[in-house]
Image (cartoon, rainbow, N blue to C red):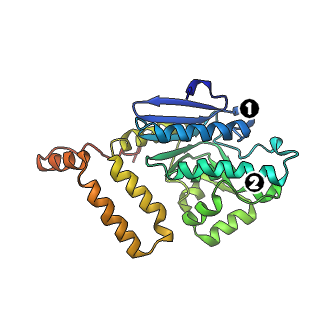
Amino acid sequence: MDLNSLETLNVALDDGVATITLARPGSRNAINSAMREELGALVRYILNEQSIRAVVLTGAGDTFCAGGDLLGMEGVNSSIMRQRLMAAHTYLTELMNLDRPVIAAVDGTAYGAGFSLAMAADMVVASNRARFCMAFMRVGLLPDYGAMYTLPRVVGLQRAKEMIYSAREISAEEALRLGIVLELHEPQDVLPRALAMAHAMKHISPTAFGFTKHSLNQSYESSLATMLGLEAAAQSMAVATPECTEAIARFAAKQAPAYTWPNAHGK
């Protein structure tokens, strides 16, 4: 895949970290047909490129993503809409289950499908001017891009219903309180913070991280017995990895661990 030939996305690779920038600033990075196709192709590329150890998803300019491109929906019938969403669901599922960390760096607007896309990440870091909105009811649509799955799991069912039914704007501070956002920073610090987290997390054992994410993603639908079974099976493989062996040797030698979480600036 020629990463330099993408029209709606900018991709930067830096020592194992891929930064994906939604790049339609003239349309507030709204998701159009070209962006959907390129996101799908790019997620598949990352799935098969094991040198990429972490992903940061952000938007160009002072907007994360305004949602779907409504201008591109004129004349769209039921059949076309279903086909579009089914194609998007393929790469969204792959992104949500990616066996590497995915961090969304949100500055400015995250509306509609843009909000949903941010929720597909493992963690969301946002600016103090970020704004979130499940805006679908404003245009006679229902939440898509997986929001009816992800949002209730973060904020609870009743709050998710209120946010969806009201289509009201959520401030950065409220998003932090609700757990939608992990951290808030000044706009100029959001992407550097997300990149610092990604560069730290690339040192996690791929085996340990992949099994952990897989298990956590199943935890709400699984019984205790199922989760304990996953734990035992995965741990038996993780303990035999070079990363675990090295970590134990470092501990025995009283050396600092290879993986440490970066402190947020000013905290």
Label located before the other in sequence (2 or 1)? 1
- Mark 1, residue position: 26
Q: Percent position (x, y) of residue 188?
A: 53, 35
Q: Is residue 267 left or right of residue 158?
A: left
- Say what secondary structure mark 2 lies in: helix
| Type of amino acid under label 2 | Arg
Q: Percent position (x, y) of residue 41?
A: 59, 38
Q: Quadrant of the N terminus?
A: top right
- Say what secondary structure mark 1 lies in: helix
Q: Residue at x 56, y 57 (%)?
A: 180
Res 104 quadrant in image:
top right
Res 146 quadrant in image:
bottom right
- Mark 2, residue position: 82
Q: Is residue 219 above or below residue 194?
A: below
Q: Is residue 230 above or below residue 145?
A: below
Foreground: 180 or 116? 116
| Type of amino acid under label 1 | Gly
Q: Residue at x 87, y 44 (%)?
A: 74
- Residue 109 visible: yes
Mark 1 crowd level (few <14, some 14–19, many ≥20, 10 Å Cα): few
Extreme-left residue of the structure: 253
Q: Percent position (x, y) of residue 240?
A: 23, 52
Q: Nearer the viewer, mark 2 or mark 1?
A: 2
- Residue 111 visible: no
Q: Is residue 152 left or right of residue 162?
A: left
Q: How many marks?
A: 2
Foreground: 221 or 191? 221
Q: Percent position (x, y) of residue 246?
A: 20, 45
Foreground: 80 or 174? 80
Extreme-top residue of the structure: 4
Q: Is residue 221 above or below residue 96?
A: below
